[in-house]
Image (spheres, grey):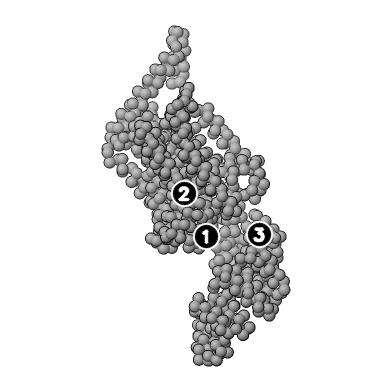
Amino acid sequence: MEATDGKVLYLRSLQGDSVKPIRRERKVARKQERDRVVAVTRQTATGPARWLWPGLIALLTLAAFLPALTNGFVDWDDEATLVDNPSYRGLGRAELRWMFTTFHMGHYQPMSWVTFGVDYLLWGMDPFGYHLTSLLLHAANAALFYFVSLRLLSLALSIPAEPRDIVLRACAGFAALVFAVHPLRVESVAWATQRRDVLSSLFFLWTLLCYLRAAAESAAARWRWMAAAVFVYSLSLLSKAGGITLPVVLLVFDVYPLRRLGGGSGRWLGPTARRVWWEKVPFMLLAMLFGIVALLAQQEAGALKPVARYGVASRIAQALFGVAFYLWKTVIPLGLSPLYELPVRLDPWDWPFVLSGLVVVAASAGLLLARRRWPAGLAIWICYVALLAPVLGTAQSGPQIAADRYSYLSCLGWAMLAGAGLIYCWRLLVSSYIRSGTFVLIAGVASAVVAVLAVLTWRQAQVWHDSERLWRHAVAVTPESSTVHYNLALILHKRTELVGAIEHYQRSLRINPVSADAYNNLGEALAQQGELGEAIKHYRQALQINASYAPAYNNLGSVLAQRGELEEAIKHYRYALRINPGAADVHHNLGSVLVQRGDLDEAVEHYRQALGLGLADSEVHFSLGDALARKGKLDEAVKHFRQALRIRPEFAEAHESLGRALARQGKRDEAAQHYQEALRIMRSGSAGGVPTK
């Protein structure tokens, strides 16, 4: 065909014809072909399809993610965000004030906290309700993206998106499903902490719809829709600052497919173009404001890594790797992990980073050269990179080099490209370039792609069922990550599965031998096994790595106290308190050693400080009561023994000590009752003394 066109051009040039009329004829032919596509597309569609498609998309999305509803909270920020955090529980004045002022866990997300507050009022602490809310938000995003795709595809193809355009709607629905049921979405939906992803994306997509509607309206109506877009965008940023590069996306839309900018003289800076630029000012101001707030939140949490640790070259390599990584995982979504760990030493010349750089440069150059023939390709690429930019490592926070959740917004364009590809195949069918059987095969492949993605999503959602399953999966997928071994070891350690915990602590340290946390926790596990000498070695190793690591001083003090080395234990407890004066457990431990040494006055002072710092548990009250009883302050001792028993009624040693104090006060009958209760508890096997700290 191209060769024939070339011959025609050559012959017409010999005949003296101009090239311009030939180009004009081609434009007319293309318009006639597009009109035929539109006419055929509209032959079989019906009105109800306007609402049938988004409803069907939402239902299929819910079906693919159903396993998430049986998941619990996982020990990967869920505990710090939800389980151990009472501040968000409710929508009273105190809770709302906290939601709109806190940088908890390094994020400013008041709207997300509001949804968690609603969940708590509806469900208490039942994980089912929290996961249900996240899933419903994701299903709503799928429906919203359908409308965004419909609008953009119709603009790109110059096809009005009327209710009867069933093929266009089917292709927009395909794009929405590719986005919604892709396994890369699982982390944002099935991980309760990441509510901010789905909620901010809901408002982000709504902003795009308002903006596209504004661009199609007359001047009077345009500003109303533009004001709505700015308002909804602010809600997106109040949910999470992930959409701060939206102004870049809107500018891309203005160039293509809206064609409000570019394309000729005065189309960039002329009077009409200046109005388009001014429309972005409110979005840019909001983006700058919330970008600064996000950085402040990360700094307060201590999550930002200094440039000195990962230099400029390493950060460029990381950014290029990220751009290529999400492309690869979009095409082949296998081996997904909750953590792709940033290497301890990142060499920009390692082959994954060099290959990623070559892929990104080649894709950028190719799409730039093809921008006139295929402007959609370059538009999607720029939007993809812009939406990824905040999480590509230029301001590195956290241990990850990449994360599935970062694809939630950035990969929308690739899903839309899938829908556009299906429309292109339909146009080939209408223009008789392919046979109907070929198109049926293509449609079948598209359906199979959605089915395979949904099955992978169903399986991936089950990975987040509980903490142990999550980290065992991560160890299987990314065995070279020290953090995933460490996190699995923590889970096993909490369950007192010490052999497994020690194994994974050791594997973590083989990968990253400079982790003070891993050495400290390995020492704790060894101490629990009675290997005190080995435990001391690991605590000292942790302190060699980080001389200001207070938990290791505390644990080392506890082991030394067990071995009877009281002076050394006291010295290490004091080191810990010098680093962290607010460590209530260290005050309690130091008090216990001081009692053994006979320093009752100082011991009582440390016990009181432990209570004042919030460690108001049964052991602290018991220890303080015991010290006071030794000093002869029986009335105050009895008060603390009673408080210990209010907290833990089956505390045999507290009953016995209370009985002894009451007997010394002459209250023999009541003393006898507590002695008998202590005997009953010990005989039943439920006695409990003071655990080792």
Which residue is nearer to you in this view: 193 or 352?
193
Q: Are marks 3 and 2 in contact (CB under 8 Å)?
A: no
Q: Earlier in the sequence, mark 1 or mark 3?
A: 1
Q: Which type of secondary structure does the marked residue at label 3 adopt?
A: helix
- Left or right of residue 97: residue 572: right
Let me know if residue 192 appears in the view: no
Q: Which type of secondary structure does the marked residue at label 1 adopt?
A: helix
**Callout 1 amino acid:** Ala
**Callout 3 amino acid:** Ala
Which residue is nearer to you in this view: 588 or 94?
94
Q: Residue at x 48, y 61 (%)?
A: 87
Q: Which type of secondary structure does the marked residue at label 2 adopt?
A: helix
**Callout 2 amino acid:** Leu
Mark 1 vs mark 2, CA separation in Å? 20 Å
Q: Nearer the viewer, mark 3 or mark 2?
A: 2
Let me know if residue 38 appears in the view: yes
Q: Residue at x 50, y 91 (%)?
A: 669
Q: Name the disc covering residue 80, or none.
A: 1
Q: Position of residue 255 (x, y in %)?
A: 46, 30
Q: Quadrant of residue 526?
A: bottom right
Q: Position of residue 436 (x, y in %)?
A: 35, 32
Q: Is residue 383 above or below residue 140?
A: above
Mark 1 vs mark 3, CA separation in Å? 21 Å
Residue on which the image places disc 2: 238
Q: Is residue 457 above or below residue 165?
A: below
Residue on which the image places disc 3: 516
Q: Nearer the viewer, mark 1 or mark 2?
A: 2
- Left or right of residue 671: residue 692: right
* Quadrant showing the C terminus: bottom right
- Left or right of residue 324: residue 631: right
